[in-house]
Amino acid sequence: MTVELSLTRDPAHIRHGSNIGQPMTRTDGVLKVTGKARYAADNHPPGMVYAVIATSCIARGRVKSLDVAAAKRHPGVIDVMTPAHKPELAEDPDAKGNPFAFRMELLQSDEVRYANQAIAVVIAETLEAATEGAALLSPRYQVEIARVGLDAGEPYTPPVVGIGNPAEVRHGDIDAGIAAASKLTDSTYETPAQYHNAMEPHAIVAVWDGDRLFIDTPSQGMGFAQMRIAGLFGIPPANIHINSPFLGGGFGSKGLISGPQVLGIMAARLIGRPVKLVLRRSQMYGPVGHRPPTRQRIRIGTDDAGQLTAINHEARVTTSSFDDFYEPAADASHTLYASPAIRTAHEAVRVDTGTPLFMRAPGEATGSIVLESAIDEAAFACGIDPLEFRLKNYAEVEPTTGKPFSSKALRQCYAKAAERFGWAGRPLQPKQMRDENGFLVGWGMGTATFPAIMFQGNARAVIRADGKGVMETGAHDMGQGAWTALAQISADSLGLNFDQLTFRSGSSDLPDAGIAGGSGHTATVGAAIHNAGAAVIAKLAELATSDERSPLFGAGNAGVVARAGRLHRRDDDARSESYAEILARAGLAEVDATGSGAADATAQSQYAMHAHGAVFAEVKVDPELGQIRATRLVGAFAAGRIINPLLVESQLRGGMIWGLSFALHEEAVMDHRSGRILNANLAEYHVPVNADVPPMDVITVDEHDPHVNPLGIKGVGEIGITGSAGAVANAVFHATGIRVRNFPIKIEEIVMGLGS
Amino acid sequence: MMNFDYVRPASVADAIAVGSEKGASYLASGTNLLDLMKGGVSRPSRLVDLTRLPGLDRIEHLADGGLRIGALVRNADLAHDAGFARNYPAVAEALLSGASAQLRNAATVGGNLMQRTRCAYFYDAGSACNRRWPGAGCDALNGENRLHAVLGWSEGCIATHPSDFCVPLVALDAIVEIEGKSGRRELPLEALHRLPGETPERETALERGDLIVALRLPAEAQGFAKHARYIKVRERTSYAFAVVSAAASLRIEDGSIREARIALGGVAAKPWRAREAEQVLAGAAPDVAAYREAARAALAGAKPSGDNAFKIELAQRILVRALTLAAAGTPDRIPALPGSPFSSVAGA
């Protein structure tokens, strides 16, 4: 990070705020609502054919036979790709080149690792022919007993959890903290397997031209995808051209290229024609990652004053039989509450599923609903209001590291959300409130948090002879509005009005923008854009201030400021010159510069960096029938600088709805004998429908963070789900007096708990 | 997808002629059948598209005061027909509590009667299912079965019938008009769907080629319009099948119940008419004690088929609720959240 160019330290030429901070609607909104936005599967290059994956219906064993001849006899079928008939790969798909290289099934053997795994690919002239060809393969299996669920095997301690976090973290003396407690809550919770279920399934259109590969595919990380594909096919990454202008949601499942997408590339290689491969909805339950089930035991000790003495948070998670991803659920207890002793620990069990992966707030979502429920239990045990309890145990520094926070406006979040919600006067005891129709009413709250993460990203800025600008970065718009927010940063970074800017993104031919994940995309790419823009403006300033024919001559490089396509003298605003005039006199067609963004290691070592929030929920519960309905949600979030309030509120709202979904609806149901998922469709894998979503208030709390990155951005992609899930669950307890510890909360627990 | 013939007959007679052939399947809007075909559960070799058949999309008021609803009338059109909702409010509420607006706009009355169970094991081609493959066994038994049947099930099948629409219909003595190879016949709706017994694969009383052409509601069914409700507990507010539902219709005269019509949904392989409960209420005062006794009678023969004992308790409570709300009077308008226990919440 170039310190002298950073906004929050000492901006030289750039003034952010003309475009940043404005509630602009999505620049791609009209394209989307008119159906003109071209998603990956909308592409049909000449000569394109269709590939359909045949999937395993067993969870463990071997494929003994496939009736390839029957499939090939079906009219329109061109070829069937099997372990015995497929293009050579340059790299073993089971090789672990780096922690982000997850093993994938590319027909390397007849082994079946999980239900819905690819066992063959049928290529045909039409989608219908390929689909029927896949059905005609009639696989025969050698079946082994599937390992299903959290008790399927001997638990072990994973080497790391999440990305390189230790499986166990100890702060203070946990035994002493537990011993010192005058009250101890000890609860065990379970969270279910969940699947990303982006509206747009994983899809790819692959075209080979010699050793060059052109693909249309939704991606949250084109650079990573290029590297992986390059390794698998033995070609240089630069030969791989990925086009990914729009994603119909990703939520982490499109962060890394998945096995099925690579199978599409292999199919195109095999038959020498462009191939399209789109996963069916049911096929998304397996090879593209999921949130694993967890069982979490959490013990919270408090003293007579309601002060925490210990948090001991232990999580058991599942991972696949063949790879290692460990949901860092217990890590949610690291940062939120001041306790002299904190221990988090993980253990894992291998099961016959696809490998779990990053799913919106990995670790934070599963851990937060348990931590926030357990904090609610502890507050209740102490007879203290849940908000007061949280304020009493407010962490002034990050508890497990002792680092100060780079910024933390959580107190204001609590206050604003509580006031908007009308929390004051809430009865401590449950089952005290009824509405005019006799429904039980409950109020619950949860604290939201998510780390402010950055990856590595790059951008290239250009000012052209006509005075207009171009910003190029291979960023990813998953539907969250990244293109709009990044264009706003671009315009300000180039000192241009929004309509003077051309923003190019969504292609791997542009500078690598890193991965759109970890809620870090805007921060990372925003910093790269800021630096690229500042570097170009510095070049223009140099041209002008060193040329005696310019009105800016002699102002000195730092003596000018960029605004609306002109440089102005800092000490005399009336003296200015347009970019076009500067370039014309210099005889230049354009000036350009690149910039990069990444976390500042020094700042990171000195400060704990997190976004925070507070969510309050009201639910109503039918006192006899047990039906639950969320009726109000209020969330206040402090996430550093807000680039576009409209888009940010939309992100937060979506996250809060996901939290509601976590508490009340979402669950993949797996047959405990076969390991097959029984509700692999959107009719029976329940997420909230519009009628389930209550009136919501989303508040953003101003937060100026001078340390986190040049623009002061913390990210909002994932925080909304944390806090919200626990708030809803706690509201159900407050309404009913029933503490449900298996999520989602099911009607039978309420019906049987309420008594007749 | 497998190749199949597609025919569009011009008359009911032509439809029956081609529909009687082996491997043929009638197609109305396909909201269920096409999903089954995509999943490989149904593999008809010929689809007989009924949607252009003339005369089947009418709602007719009969001379005897009854109502005849053509099999191709769309669910949404029927529910939003003002006269229909006024005369058969519980049926309209049940219709609007089912599926989603998009599905209701497409789905037909006849198709709804013929929809298949939502048992996941029926849909999962890798599972054993006696409905799909007689004699294969039932993987739902001892499987994930918290939502399965508590009434009328057998060791061979514990699936439930998913329809909302059929629940109040069966309570109101609806009649199904059927055309077949041997001409026209009628069947009480209650006799259309079968309990599994030893032959779960025989889901209805229809023979090959039989075509439902209309549904009839008798005139006397309107006598319950002032006290009729459909209540449905489900796992989300819309686009979810019933965990358990209840239709309750009462004729109240001089402060006592002259006649009650009661049916339950989500509890059995067919919409479950609860005649024992009706008998309990005949002549009784409309109060909670009577409703509870009726509910006990309705579920007296229930037993869990798996992790679903709660449904027996829940079904009784829903029935008490439906009766309570029905006795209080049919609302002037169908609630904004049809069938929901929260239908009374203002602003919902």
Image (cartoon, rainbow, N blue to C red):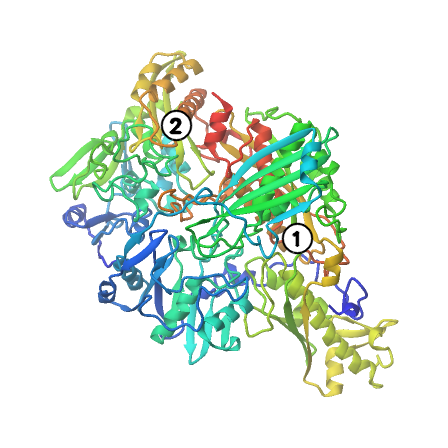
* Residue nearest the viewer, comparing B135 with A20: B135
* Residue nearest the viewer, comparing B341 with A356: A356
Q: Looking at numbered disc 1 in the image, what kind of residue is underneath it?
A: Pro
Which circle marks residue A451 in the picture? 1
* Residue ID for mark 2: B309
Q: How far across and down, in percent of the image, does residue B200 sit?
A: 23, 37
Whether residue A667 can be seen here: yes
In the image, are marks 2 and 1 on the same chain? no
Q: How far across and down, in percent of the image, does residue B265 sit?
A: 35, 31
Image check: A139 left or right of A229?
left
Which part of the image, by quadrant, shows the N terminus of chain A? bottom right
Image check: B59 left or right of A596?
left
Instruction: Provide the chain ID for the residue under circle 1.
Output: A
Dot 2 falls on a residue whose secondary structure is helix
At 49% from the left and 73% from the top, the residue drawn is: A230
**Label 2 to label 1, Cα distance in Å?**
44 Å
In which quadrant of the rendered view does residue A128 lie?
Answer: bottom left
Whether residue A426 can be seen here: no
Image check: B297 left or right of A393?
left
Question: Dot 2, how many residues are within 10 Å of its Cα: few (below 14), some (14-19), or many (20+)?
Answer: some
Q: Looking at numbered disc 2 in the image, what kind of residue is underneath it?
A: Ala
